[in-house]
Image (cartoon, coloured by chain):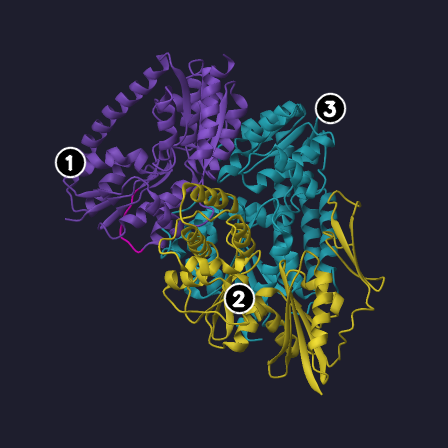
Chain colours: A cyan, B purple, C yellow
């Protein structure tokens, strides 16, 4: 009997599980939440100077295997992320595990025929029509989640009842998992959106606003950024973040042309992965009166390293401070906290509060 | 007449010969920065970001060296050679990094075969900026390519014939901008040659063959230069005694591709990762023991 | 009766304490080694301060900063706990309202703070490791058989500083040993080390930052004349080193304690205060957070280190 599992990133394991469990009639194993053990395991078996998402996803795979999984899913593209799968499969097989790794994106594209073939191998009853239908619902779910998250991010720092947003989001995600049809999902979404808007907040007009940009995995997996957003919210800061799965899947390819036009003064070409996007976002944040920008990435993230000097230049031109973080598996948490504290002290001083 | 500056880093090791013949034919004066030395390395660290790879750091050093010595600096951008043959993201961003770091005029062209931007179009584009006629540029391009192909073919022949040598043969898997850089690969090559080892260079093999053959080691690989490199392992299979993987810290593609290759081959190998602090003493110790082992001296 | 404010800066290497009055005059100060035990160091510090403090002073505010700020803040019941970057900037601005750049190299970290019109506009801290900081300098001094305090004077003797790769402690050490073995004069090596610290600092922490005068250099390493000299040389600007530069963090936090006073009077009597910390590993989930529980007079006042927030 095949047991399937997948790596984790933020809350996206919920739509992932939703899709897989409806499409495949095999056991789906939810990996344990990312913890220190995950990253320890991942680091132990990873090449030395690979970027951290490799370590996190490999760690999760090993934990899933421990729980009995023998099929794993991996996806990604844009930089070396797209090549993770093959190397991870080799590492797992060298460790003596007999697992199938299905790469949803290979060589930068999604080859539907190949994926269907691979899914048929693990579940002979796999139906394309059903898969199509549930993929549609799942993508909508992702869109709704990202939309709600955006609202949460700009308000969670100002909630009156502590934890109100988090507990409602928890409820929403639990309900999303149980939906049977698109209509139900749609109804649930509107219901919860209203609920979120009913949560009382005390948000002053002149609150501090910070934009978070950087490498996608580190941005979207809170454990890997040391719960940066939570930390900022606790200090009553409005957070703007651009990267989410919906953006990567549907918006990125359209927006890039506009981005290049906006930043013509600085860059001529599209740079790797999200580098040009982040350069354009820097300009956006500077022009829209954000108090500061936090750029986060995993260590050795080549595309973002290339973007950093340009981001720095733009921010300097506008006089907006940027805080750069490069996270590795063993970054000191105290150091991060000190820097962050100093950052919002500085922003408040700049505001003349 | 405007003088063109050519930084001796990254792109130079792929296109230097073509550029030189192209400019020679058109009688355009040019200056090439000297081999990487301590001064250039220091300039490189000054203008680069701490986490950039050693090759990009030295490249920026070369650009800075040329800053006040010419009218234009030639900085191309290479995106891809087709969908399955992408380059490292530094090849995509080097131009914009240079443009934002230095206050200089650049000559730039883009290679993006997915969008039909070829080397020919690129060279003609920069030739026009230098006020040359189209017909002349086409001739210059043909001349440069002919000379390049002749040289390249003889180099490949020479390199490939080394496989018949009776000496201990080591395949050096490394990007040419590392292999032939004075501060990175030079000492290693010198050491190996002195110790009577035949070095097969992974970049001096027929890339049409190696690119295809790489599929036997990695089917999902989409980095052109990495494919050419590890394809060399298949092309020389059974004819070499050992492999040296040489890369610049912290090379993105190499970190994964070399890892996979090391796990798949059944040959003795060492993995050398160099950064601007590496001293040759440490490398020498590792090379020495590796060569000793291959030669079997220690068992006698 | 005079109202006074206590500022304590507990770094990894040294602990600094200062008492100021309403007009920011320093009444007394104290500087001792932390020796890996901040609680004990602060007990000693407070004892020293108590002996020197004039009879008519009443403490109206206490502030803590530095890496052990939270712990000591609980211990002293401080009315303000702030990070060292803010504290240093505030302290320096108290004496030099026109300062535009603060360079700081301390025991284990180094930072740069840019100030325009009296507010911090940008800052950076070292990201790599302890290379080029105070602890690195003192370990190298020991290796060369010199006293850290003479180190700077020694460097001034040199005319030809040797080039030393100082980006990483390990590499610098091997480079240093090599140069010493080859036979370079000691003063040139020492000078080379001082210069490499400056270059390394500017390339790492100072990268992309506009360093404008007036420039103030502080932190333990600012006591090293060699490093000061090379900062002047490389930046081609005058470098101000205040005689109280090592106290700036403590002064800054004392000023902040004054600004944030709550109208309470504080006692400096610590001998009857029992203060304990207990470390334990939480086993509730696979995070295995290392929890640190803080007890004041056997009463749990706080616990840190939990990722889930249950504690």
Q: Are marks 3 and 2 on the same chain?
A: yes
Task: Please state which of residues A264 and B250 is positioned toward the viewer in this rendering.
Answer: B250
Q: Mark 1, residues whose alpha carbon is within 10 Å: few (<14), some, or many (≥20)? A: some
Whether residue A101 is visible: yes
Of the numbered discs in the image, which one, if any, rests on residue B25?
1
The residue tagged 2 is A291
Answer above or below: position of C238 versus B168.
below
Query: Gap between marks 1 and 2, in whole Å?
Result: 55 Å
Task: Residue C240: give x, y in percent of width and height.
Answer: 45, 70
Q: Are marks 1 and 3 in contact (CB under 8 Å)?
A: no
Give the magenta range: B103-109
State the residue in front, C151 or A46.
C151
Prevalent SS, magenta region: loop
What is the secondary structure assignment of the residue under circle 2? loop
The quadrant in which the C terminus of chain A is found is bottom right
Q: Chain of mark 3?
A: A
| In this rendering, the label closer to the viewer, 1 or 3 | 1
Name the element at disc 1: helix
Residue at mark 2: chain: A
Please check the rendered image and state whether residue A96 is part of the magenta-colored stretch, yes or no.
no
- Compare residues C65 and B213 and report the one nearer the observer: C65
Up/down of A23 relative to C208, above or below: above
State left or right for residue C302 relative to residue B33.
right
Q: Which residue is mark 3?
A: A1
Residue A77 pos. (x, y %): 51, 38
3D distance between C-alphas at marks 1 and 3: 69 Å
Q: Is residue B292 left or right of residue C234?
A: right
Name which quarter of the figure residue B84 lies in: top left
Chain holding disc 1? B
């Amino acid at each position: 009997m095949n047991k399937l599992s997948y790596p984790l990133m933020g809350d996206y394991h919920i739509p992932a599980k939703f899709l897989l469990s409806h499409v495949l009639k095999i056991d789906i194993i939810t990996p344990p939440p990312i913890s220190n053990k995950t990253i320890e395991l991942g680091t132990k078996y990873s090449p030395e100077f690979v970027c951290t998402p490799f370590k996190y996803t490999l760690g999760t795979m090993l934990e899933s295997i421990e729980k009995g999984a023998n099929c794993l899913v991996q996806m990604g593209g844009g930089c070396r992320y797209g090549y993770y799968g093959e190397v991870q499969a080799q590492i797992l097989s060298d460790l003596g595990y007999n697992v199938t790794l299905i790469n949803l994106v290979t060589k930068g594209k999604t080859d539907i025929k190949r994926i269907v073939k691979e899914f048929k191998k693990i579940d002979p009853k796999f139906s394309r029509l059903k898969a199509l239908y549930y993929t549609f619902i799942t993508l909508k779910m992702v869109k709704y989640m990202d939309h709600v998250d955006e609202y949460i991010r700009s308000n969670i720092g100002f909630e009156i009842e502590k934890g109100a947003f988090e507990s409602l989001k928890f409820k929403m995600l639990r309900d999303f998992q149980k939906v049977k049809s698109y209509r139900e999902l749609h109804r649930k979404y509107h219901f919860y959106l209203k609920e979120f808007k009913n949560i009382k907040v005390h948000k002053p007009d002149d609150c501090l606003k910070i934009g978070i940009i950087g490498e996608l995995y580190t941005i979207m997996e809170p454990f890997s950024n040391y719960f940066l957003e939570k930390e900022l919210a606790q200090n009553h800061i409005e957070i703007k973040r651009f990267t989410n799965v919906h953006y990567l899947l549907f918006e990125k390819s359209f927006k890039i042309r506009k981005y290049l036009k906006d930043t013509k003064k600085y860059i001529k070409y599209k740079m790797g992965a999200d580098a040009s996007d982040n350069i354009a976002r820097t300009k956006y944040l500077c022009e829209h009166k954000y108090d500061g920008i936090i750029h986060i990435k995993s260590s050795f993230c080549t595309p973002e390293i290339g973007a950093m000097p340009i981001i720095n230049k733009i921010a300097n031109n506008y006089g907006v401070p940027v805080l750069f973080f490069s996270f590795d598996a063993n970054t000191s948490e105290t150091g991060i906290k000190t820097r962050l504290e100093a950052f919002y002290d500085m922003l408040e001083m700049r505001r003349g509060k | 007449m405007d003088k063109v500056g050519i930084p001796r880093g990254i792109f130079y090791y792929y296109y230097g010969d073509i550029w030189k013949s192209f400019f020679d034919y058109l009688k355009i004066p040019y200056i090439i920065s000297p081999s990487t030395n301590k001064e250039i390395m220091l300039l490189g660290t000054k203008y680069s970001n701490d986490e950039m790879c050693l090759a990009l750091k030295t490249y920026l050093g070369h650009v800075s060296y040329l800053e006040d010595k010419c009218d234009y600096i030639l900085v191309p951008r290479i995106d891809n050679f087709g969908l399955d043959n992408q380059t490292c993201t530094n090849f995509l961003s080097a131009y914009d990094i240079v443009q934002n770091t230095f206050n200089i005029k650049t000559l730039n062209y883009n290679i993006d075969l997915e969008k039909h931007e070829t080397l020919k179009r690129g060279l003609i584009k920069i030739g026009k900026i230098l006020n040359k006629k189209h017909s002349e540029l086409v001739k210059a391009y043909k001349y440069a390519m002919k000379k390049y192909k002749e040289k390249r073919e003889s180099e490949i022949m020479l390199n490939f014939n080394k496989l018949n040598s009776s000496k201990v043969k080591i395949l050096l898997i490394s990007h040419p901008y590392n292999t032939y850089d004075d501060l990175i690969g030079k000492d290693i090559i010198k050491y190996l040659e002195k110790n009577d080892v035949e070095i097969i260079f992974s970049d001096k093999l027929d890339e049409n063959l190696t690119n295809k053959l790489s599929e036997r080691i990695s089917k999902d690989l989409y980095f052109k230069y990495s494919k050419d490199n590890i394809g060399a392992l298949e092309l020389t299979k059974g004819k070499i005694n050992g492999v040296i993987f040489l890369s610049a810290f912290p090379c993105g593609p190499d970190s994964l591709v070399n890892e996979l290759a090391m796990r798949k081959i059944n040959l003795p190998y060492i993995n050398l990762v160099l950064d601007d602090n590496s001293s040759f003493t440490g490398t020498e110790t590792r090379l020495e023991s590796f060569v000793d082992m291959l030669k079997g001296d220690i068992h006698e | 009766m005079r109202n006074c404010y206590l500022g304590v800066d507990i770094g990894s290497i040294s602990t600094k304490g200062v008492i100021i009055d309403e007009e920011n005059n320093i009444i007394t100060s104290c500087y001792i080694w932390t020796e890996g035990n901040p609680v004990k160091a602060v007990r000693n510090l407070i004892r020293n301060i108590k002996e020197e403090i004039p009879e008519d002073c009443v403490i109206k505010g206490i502030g803590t900063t530095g890496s052990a700020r939270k712990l000591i803040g609980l211990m002293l019941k401080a009315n303000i706990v702030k990070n060292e970057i803010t504290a240093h900037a505030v302290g320096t601005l108290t004496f030099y309202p026109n300062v535009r750049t603060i360079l700081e190299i301390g025991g284990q970290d180094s930072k740069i703070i840019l100030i325009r019109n009296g507010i911090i506009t940008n800052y950076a801290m070292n990201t790599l490791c302890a290379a080029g900081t105070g602890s690195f300098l003192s370990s190298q001094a020991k290796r060369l058989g010199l006293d850290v305090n003479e180190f700077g004077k020694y460097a001034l003797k040199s005319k030809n500083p040797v080039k030393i790769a100082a980006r990483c402690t390990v590499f610098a050490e091997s480079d240093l040993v090599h140069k010493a073995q080859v036979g370079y004069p000691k003063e040139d090596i020492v000078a080379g080390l001082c210069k490499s610290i400056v270059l390394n600092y500017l390339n790492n922490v100072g990268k992309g930052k506009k360093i404008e005068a007036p420039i103030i250099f502080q932190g333990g390493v600012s006591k090293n004349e060699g490093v000061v000299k090379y900062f002047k040389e490389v930046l081609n600007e005058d470098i101000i080193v205040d005689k109280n530069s090592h106290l700036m963090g403590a002064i800054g936090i004392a000023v902040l304690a004054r600004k944030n006073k709550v109208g309470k009077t504080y006692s400096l009597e610590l001998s009857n205060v029992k203060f304990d910390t207990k470390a334990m590993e939480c086993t509730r989930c696979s995070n295995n957070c290392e929890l640190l529980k803080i007890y004041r007079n056997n009463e749990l006042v706080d616990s840190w280190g939990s990722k889930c927030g249950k504690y």
